[in-house]
Image: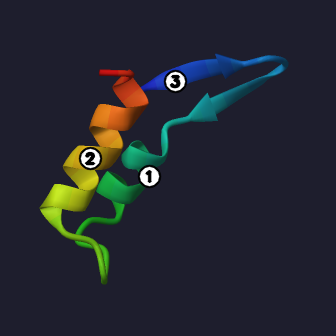
Amino acid sequence: MSIANCGYVLCLNLSWLIEKFWPVKGWTQEDLDKLKKNESGI
């Protein structure tokens, strides 16, 4: 699980939540991979 410090509140990355409930209707593995790439700043 990836946690970032967002000021006063700890925020979970969206990809963690999506993976927890995977498979998600309307999402492809490619969509999830793109989200993870964007979250990591690569």
Kind of residue at disc 3: Ile
Q: Nearer the viewer, residue 22 or 30?
A: 30
Residue at the image position 49 percent from the left and 37 percent from the top:
13
Residue 2 x/y as whole percent: 42, 26
Q: How many marks?
A: 3
Q: Report how far apart the C-alphas of labels 2 and 1 lie in the structure.
A: 15 Å
Amino acid marked by disc 1: Leu
Instruction: Specify whether residue 10 is in view.
Output: yes
From this view, report whether residue 6 is shown above or below residue 37.
Answer: above
- Left or right relative to 17: residue 8: right
Residue 10 sits in quarter: top right
- Nearer to me, 36 or 5: 36
Indicate the amino acid at tag 2. Answer: Lys
Q: Is residue 33 left or right of residue 7?
A: left
Local secondary structure at mark 3: strand
Q: Which mark is residue 3?
A: 3
Estimate how packed mark 1 is, as few (under 14), some (14 to 19) or many (20 or more) residues with alpha carbons within 10 Å: few
**Any mark on residue 29, and which?**
none
User: What kind of element bears circle 2?
Assistant: helix
The residue that appears at 44% across and 52% down in the rendered structure is 17
Residue at the spot of label 2: 34
Disc 2 crowd, CA 10 A, few/some/many (<14, 14-19, 20+): few
Closer to us: mark 2 or mark 1? 2
Q: Nearer the viewer, residue 10 or 32?
A: 32
The answer to which of marks 3 and 1 sits earlier in the sequence is 3
- Nearer the N terminus, badge 2 or badge 1? 1
Q: Is residue 39 above or below residue 8?
A: below
Q: Which mark is residue 17?
A: 1
- Choose top left, top right, bottom left or bottom right for residue 12: top right
Quadrant housing the N terminus: top left
Contact check, label 2 and label 1, Cβ < 8 Å: no
